[in-house]
Image (cartoon, helix red, strand yellow):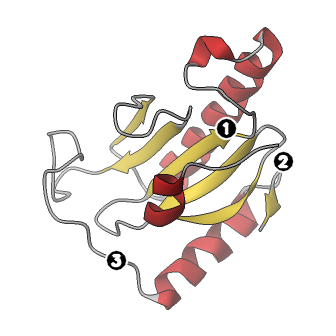
């Protein structure tokens, strides 16, 4: 059974699901910061996934990153797996813009997180609903 790490539950909002991954929104409005979590038990590293799941993760990551780049007018997309704090396998997909609060440094710990207002989350959900039309189901 798939259980999401408590830290991800605390720091993120669930937006929906792709065939493999749950799509989350980080509760940091400084950046459009999304996280994909493969719904597989006991996976902490990319290579812990089957070859089929690795290919699916890359497909979902690429689709999401390309969609977000255009939707949020990104100057650069940051895509990474780190897992130093949360060992459960998850992929960060972060929209970066020149002049964002951390640019050009990494986003981690650069500035304090800023929470989303409910209407901001609603706007992001609406935008994704219109854009993510392939194999995505909203939560």
Q: Which residue is mark 3?
A: 115
In the visual, does 111 lie left or right of 47? left
Marks 2 and 1, how far apart at CA = 9 Å
Considering depth in this image, is 87 or 135 the residue closer to the camera? 87
Q: Which residue is mark 1?
A: 63
Image location of residue 81, percent across then percent down:
45, 28
Quadrant in which residue 80 is drawn: top left
Q: Residue at x 56, y 72 (%)?
A: 124
In the visual, does 24 lie left or right of 16? left
Residue 134: image tag: 2
Q: Secondary structure at mark 2?
A: loop
Residue 77 position (above or below residue 81): below
Quadrant in which residue 48 is drawn: top right
- Quadrant assignment for the C terminus: bottom right
Residue 29: image tag: none
Image location of residue 74, percent across then percent down:
39, 49
Q: Residue at x 75, y 33 (%)?
A: 40
């Amino acid at each position: 059974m798939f259980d999401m790490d408590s830290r991800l539950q605390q720091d993120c909002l669930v937006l929906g699901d792709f065939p493999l991954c749950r799509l989350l929104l980080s509760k940091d409005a400084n950046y459009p910061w999304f996280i994909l979590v493969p719904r597989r038990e006991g996976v902490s590293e990319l290579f812990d996934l089957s070859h089929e799941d690795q290919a699916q993760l890359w497909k979902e990551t690429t689709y999401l990153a390309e969609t977000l780049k255009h939707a949020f007018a990104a100057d650069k997309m940051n895509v990474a797996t780190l897992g130093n704090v949360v060992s459960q396998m998850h992929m960060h997909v972060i929209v970066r813009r020149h002049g964002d609060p951390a640019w050009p440094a990494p986003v981690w710990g650069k500035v304090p997180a800023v929470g989303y207002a409910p209407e901001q989350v609603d706007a992001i959900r609406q935008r994704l609903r219109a854009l993510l039309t392939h194999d995505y189901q909203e939560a």
